[in-house]
Image (spheres, grey):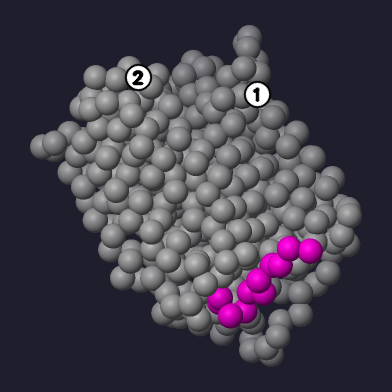
């Protein structure tokens, strides 16, 4: 196995571990509420605490990767996840859980930028970077399906933490097969100056707009589409749940697809991103007016396409835009995407309390999909010229 293959495998294992940490608690929210003797709102804070620190650590994690190498930062991230889960296992105490989940968020935040940087540093293609993103997203979805099957009895509240601990151990074992190499920046520019430049770079803001729209909106829509369909259509709750899951599941599939397009057909990357944004807008409108299962399914598929295709091109282009600080650049782009999730989920939920019962919020989301077309970078900004076309052997 080549170093690139081992790096991709280890990086994807980190992605699976962090994705599971994000999705595992919501899988048995009602059981956790009983075990902790709290309301579902408090259980929701378990995820919020993680997501806040996860978002805050993207740029610092990128800086650390640029200075120390992605493998070292990924190892640190996994150790923090292990520690957080160990603390949470101590007792069903809500304050302890919120603190532990906040600590886990430090690990997942470092792990995201370190995982995708590890794939890139070891020679992984844009398709491999997309695979990382797809597996990280799919892992959270799988946690929703698998954790309830594992939980049982009075100790079922421990299941999310035990399963996360096990996945982090496995990822750490794969990571140890790599020999960490410190990264040597291509520029002698001081790290602090490089980081400040990342925040002011208009190229990165354009890429962040694409990423935030595709990722942030798809997550926000996925959180509320079941409620929307339940209120405005005659389909069953279970059917609505399948449609809601499809927005994220298909995003996990189309993330590698976007990287494959960039790798195999680089000149088609920009049109593919443009059409994916249009698909996202069309899918949002279809969900907004869906009165049948087939129309809702079509909407979910279109949103899934929009959710994934821009992922790898956006992050790959961010790294190429700032070769002296590639990981910090990717961390910045992901920070903006996560900020949209933190803002978009409650704001979209708020739209259910006004006229239209959620439809107004979905209409605004459709407009934002289309508005992102204004930020569509050129072929040069997407780094198309820098990506060698893969030819069949």
Q: In this orientation, does residue 84 appear?
A: yes
| Quadrant holding the C terminus | bottom right
Identified at 64% across, 51% down, the residue is 131
Q: Residues within 10 Å of mark 2 (few under 14, many from 20)?
A: few
Label 2: state its secondary structure.
helix
Identified at 80% across, 47% down, the residue is 172
Magenta span contains residue 388: yes
Magenta span contains residue 142: no
Q: Farthest residue in the bottom direction? A: 188
Q: Quadrant of residue 346?
A: top left
Q: Nearer the viewer, residue 189 or 237?
A: 237
In the rendered view, would you say 80 is above or below 118?
Answer: above
Task: Give the numbered dot on residue 237.
Answer: 2
Q: Nearer the viewer, residue 335 or 116?
A: 116
Q: Farthest residue in the left direction? A: 355
Instruction: Measuring from the top left, give residue 317's x and y in whole percent.
Output: 55, 72
Instruction: Measuring from the top left, give residue 234's x and y in whole percent.
Output: 24, 19
Identified at 56% across, 85% down, the residue is 193
Q: Residues within 10 Å of mark 1 (few under 14, many from 20)?
A: many
Q: In this orientation, does residue 156 appear?
A: no
CA distance separating discs 2 and 1:
26 Å
Left or right: 245 as drawn, with respect to 1? left
Instruction: Kindly indicate whether the residue at mark 1 contacts the one at mark 2 (C-beta within 8 angstroms).
Output: no
Dominant secondary structure, magenta: loop
In the rendered view, would you say 290 is above or below 344?
Answer: above
Q: Farthest residue in the top direction? A: 153
Q: Which residues are magenta?
A: 383-393
Instruction: Measuring from the top left, give residue 147's x and y in whole percent.
Output: 61, 24
Instruction: Measuring from the top left, give residue 281's x and y in whole percent.
Output: 30, 51
Q: Quadrant of residue 385?
A: bottom right
Residue that badge 1 annotates: 159
């Amino acid at each position: 196995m080549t170093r690139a293959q081992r790096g991709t495998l280890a990086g994807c294992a980190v992605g699976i571990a962090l994705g599971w940490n994000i999705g595992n608690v919501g899988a048995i929210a009602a059981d956790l509420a009983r075990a902790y003797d709290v309301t579902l709102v408090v259980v929701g804070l378990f995820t919020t605490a993680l997501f806040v620190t996860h978002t805050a650590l993207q740029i610092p994690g990128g800086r650390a990767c640029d200075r120390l190498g992605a493998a070292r930062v990924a190892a640190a991230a996994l150790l923090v996840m292990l520690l957080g889960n160990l603390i949470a296992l101590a007792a069903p105490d809500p304050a302890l859980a919120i603190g532990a989940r906040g600590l886990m968020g430090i690990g997942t935040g470092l792990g995201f930028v370190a995982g995708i940087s590890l794939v890139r540093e070891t020679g992984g293609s844009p398709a491999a970077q997309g695979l990382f993103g797809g597996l990280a997203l799919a892992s959270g979805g799988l946690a929703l399906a698998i954790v309830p099957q594992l939980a049982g009895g009075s100790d079922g509240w421990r299941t999310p933490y035990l399963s996360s601990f096990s996945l982090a151990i496995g990822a750490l074992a794969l990571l140890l097969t790599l020999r960490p190499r410190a990264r040597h920046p291509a520029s002698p520019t001081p790290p602090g100056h490089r980081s400040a430049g990342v925040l002011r770079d208009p190229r990165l803001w354009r890429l962040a707009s694409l990423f935030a729209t595709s990722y942030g909106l798809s997550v926000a829509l996925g959180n509320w589409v079941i409620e929307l369909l339940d209120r405005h259509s005659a389909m069953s709750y279970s059917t609505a749940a399948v449609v809601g899951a499809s927005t994220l599941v298909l995003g996990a599939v189309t993330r590698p697809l976007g990287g494959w397009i960039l790798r195999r057909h680089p000149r088609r990357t920009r049109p593919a991103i443009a059409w994916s944004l249009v698909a996202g807008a069309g899918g949002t409108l279809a969900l907004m007016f869906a009165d049948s299962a087939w129309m809702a399914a079509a909407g979910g598929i279109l949103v899934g396409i929009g959710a994934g295709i821009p992922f790898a091109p956006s992050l790959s282009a961010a790294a190429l835009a700032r070769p002296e600080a590639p990981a910090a650049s990717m961390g910045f782009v992901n920070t903006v995407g996560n900020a949209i999730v933190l803002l978009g989920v409650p704001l979209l939920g708020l739209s259910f309390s006004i006229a239209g019962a959620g439809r107004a919020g979905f209409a605004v989301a459709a407009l934002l999909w289309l508005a992102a077309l204004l930020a569509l970078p050129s072929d040069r900004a997407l780094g198309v010229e820098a990506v060698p076309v893969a030819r069949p052997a």
